[in-house]
Image (tube, grey):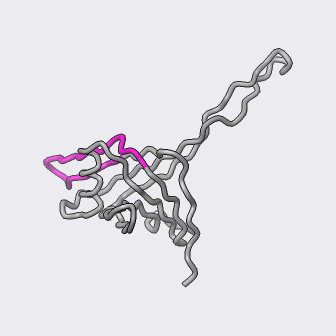
Amino acid sequence: MARGVNFLIKVNTANSDTPSYEAVAAQRSGTFNRGYDTIDMTSKDNSGWQDSDYGNGNWSISGSGVLEEEDPALDALDAAFLAAETVMVQFEFASGKKYEGEAVITDFSIEAPHDDVATYSLELTGKGKYEEIEASAS
């Protein structure tokens, strides 16, 4: 049985020529979303039933956690967000399998309540298709 604690969001903290993926520190949640837009193919020939087909695919990664100010992955996200640049990200399974792709940071929030720990939340929207990377045999 897979446990959520073993799934990680990772960010490339180096460059595209020699990537180095670091897990975002102190994660509490992570979600890998995948979907398709639909194309309405309905016509009078469908006897009153809607007919749909696959349109464009989409994916995103969202997550949240405790804010660690000295985290290389959060620093890379912050720099990319401020420069309006894309980031290379991975969603890693407990087995080592990964989904990897280029993403736009569409939300990067920091919450700092007076009576609790500071936290972050982020939304990364895929730019193009993601790649599936199988777990390496060790």
**Rendering coords of residue 85 (x, y %):** 32, 46
Residue lying at the far left of the rendered structure: 114
What residue is rendered at 32% in x and 64% in y? Answer: 14
Name the one closer to the observer, 30 or 21. Answer: 21
In this view, the residue in front, 96 or 63, is 96
Asked which quadrant contains residue 67, the reply is: bottom left
| Residue 90 within the magenta-colored segment of the rendering | no
Farthest residue, direction front = 17
Residue at 37 percent of width and 52 percent of height: 87
Residue reaching furthest to the bottom: 138
Q: Quadrant of the C terminus?
A: bottom right
User: Residue 107 in magenta?
Assistant: yes
Residue 43's place in the image compared with 25, above or below, is above
Q: How many marks?
A: 0
Question: Could you tell me which quadrant the N terminus lies in?
Answer: bottom right
Is residue 12 left or right of 53 when viewed as pictured?
A: left
Q: Quadrant of residue 83?
A: top left
Residue 107 relative to residue 70: left or right:
right
Q: Which residues are magenta?
A: 103-122
Q: Is residue 110 left or right of residue 86?
A: left
Q: Position of residue 102 (x, y in %)?
A: 44, 51
- Identify the main secondary structure in magenta: strand
Residue at the (79%, 22%) spot, across then down: 49
Q: Position of residue 100 (x, y in %)?
A: 49, 58
Asked if 55 appears above or below 102 in the picture, the reply is above
